[in-house]
């Protein structure tokens, strides 16, 4: 029970942080809806560290109306754990890989350059080689089925900063899935890659600092970008990610009333690269490797002392677009 609780928590932490750096996509709701949720995230400041060499140009998204992309995002995770109640480290755990297919369509372009684009999750599933009990795999697939075909609309400015998002939430959605989707919508301002205001060239570097909301916790994050190549309306960026957090309690959906999970410390670093085409809203390709060390106190019931866990998690994510 405790191990399953921990594994699920780490996956959700990864979704709250690293996935947002990899792709500007979110979980939303199906078209047939009875309720709508609008999110207007705060804009994170972009700090230009180095403008790079000449020639320089302003990096701006300029897609054509009705531009459509099909993107595939894959995630795999390895985790090692050590408990204060065990004499030796637990065996390494390889969690099942997840593959998500996303369709985006540019639906409106405003005179000021703001871009409205629709998105839909056409498929989400586990990789076939996942080694885990069939019942556990089936439970995850059942949860994924609620996300398939979810849609929404996001508005970003020409620099890629998210200005608003609309999520349509059906009344039939169960509370656990609804809370997970609310978590993703709360973090909408972390999804897009914000470009600097001034013109930049190869070697340019900028930093975006923000607070990511992860199930009731505030996770400070700093993302850095460096222009490696800039030509023909596209840019290759080197990406860096840092996250740090201490002494916060996670409001994880589905936990029993007497259970709790406290993050005593969390330190995450990530490196990777992505290629952007400024006539598209999703990266044409992206890779990100994240390593995270965490200390957690897991309470299952009031009659048991908390179990302190130290974890080392490695997360690899890739995205390709057609």
Image (cartoon, helix red, strand yellow):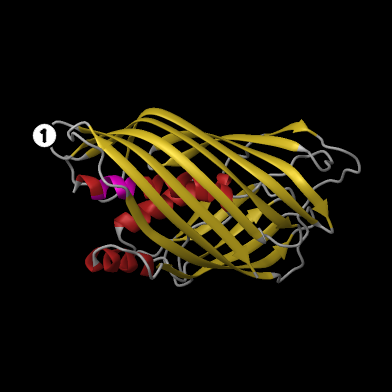
Res 138 → quadrant? bottom left
Comparing 108 with 50, the one in front is: 50
Q: Which residue is mark 1?
A: 304
Q: Quadrant of the C terminus?
A: bottom right
What's the magenta bit mostly, secondary-structure-wise?
Answer: helix
**Residue 296 screen position, x and y as percent:** 30, 34
**Residue 282 screen position, x and y as percent:** 64, 60
The residue shown at (68%, 66%) is 106
Q: Is residue 167 left or right of residue 259?
A: right
Residue 44: within the magenta? no
The residue shown at (64%, 55%) is 155
**Residue 151 screen position, x and y as percent:** 51, 66
Residue numbers of the magenta segment = 4-9
Q: Residue furthest left?
A: 303
**Residue 190 screen position, x and y as percent:** 56, 45
Any part of residue 172 in sight: no
Q: Is residue 164 left or right of residue 217?
A: right
Q: Is residue 98 left or right of residue 192?
A: left
Res 41 → quadrant? top right
Report crowding for label 1: few under 14, some 14 to 19, many 20 or more residues within 10 A (C-alpha): few
Any part of residue 54 in sight: yes
């Amino acid at each position: 029970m405790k191990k399953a609780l921990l594994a699920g928590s780490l996956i959700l932490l990864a979704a709250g942080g690293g996935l947002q750096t990899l792709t500007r996509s979110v979980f939303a709701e199906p078209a047939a809806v009875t309720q709508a949720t609008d999110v207007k995230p705060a804009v994170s400041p972009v700090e230009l560290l180095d403008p790079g060499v000449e020639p320089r140009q302003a990096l701006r998204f300029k897609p054509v109306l009705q531009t459509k992309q099909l993107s595939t995002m894959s995630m795999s995770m390895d985790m090692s754990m050590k408990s204060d109640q065990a004499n030796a480290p637990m065996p390494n755990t390889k969690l099942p890989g997840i593959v998500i297919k996303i369709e985006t369509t540019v639906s409106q372009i405003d005179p000021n350059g703001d871009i409205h684009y629709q998105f839909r999750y056409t498929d989400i599933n586990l990789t076939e080689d996942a080694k885990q009990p069939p019942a556990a795999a089936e439970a995850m697939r059942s949860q994924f089925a609620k996300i398939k075909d979810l849609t929404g609309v996001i508005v970003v400015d020409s620099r890629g900063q998210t200005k608003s998002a609309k999520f349509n939430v059906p009344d039939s959605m169960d509370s656990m899935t609804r809370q997970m989707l609310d978590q993703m919508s709360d973090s909408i301002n972390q999804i897009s890659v914000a470009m600097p205001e001034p013109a930049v060239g190869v070697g340019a570097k900028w930093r975006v600092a923000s607070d990511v909301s992860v199930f009731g916790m505030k996770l400070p994050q700093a993302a850095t970008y460096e222009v490696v190549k800039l030509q023909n309306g596209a840019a290759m960026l080197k990406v860096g990610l840092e996250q740090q957090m201490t002494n916060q309690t996670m409001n994880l959906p589905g936990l029993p009333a007497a259970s709790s999970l406290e993050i005593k410390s969390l330190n995450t670093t990530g490196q990777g690269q992505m290629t952007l085409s400024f006539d598209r809203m999703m990266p044409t390709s992206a890779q990100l490797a994240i390593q995270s060390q965490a200390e957690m106190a897991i309470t299952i019931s009031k009659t048991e002392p908390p179990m302190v866990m130290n974890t080392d998690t490695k997360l690899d994510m890739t995205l390709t677009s057609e």
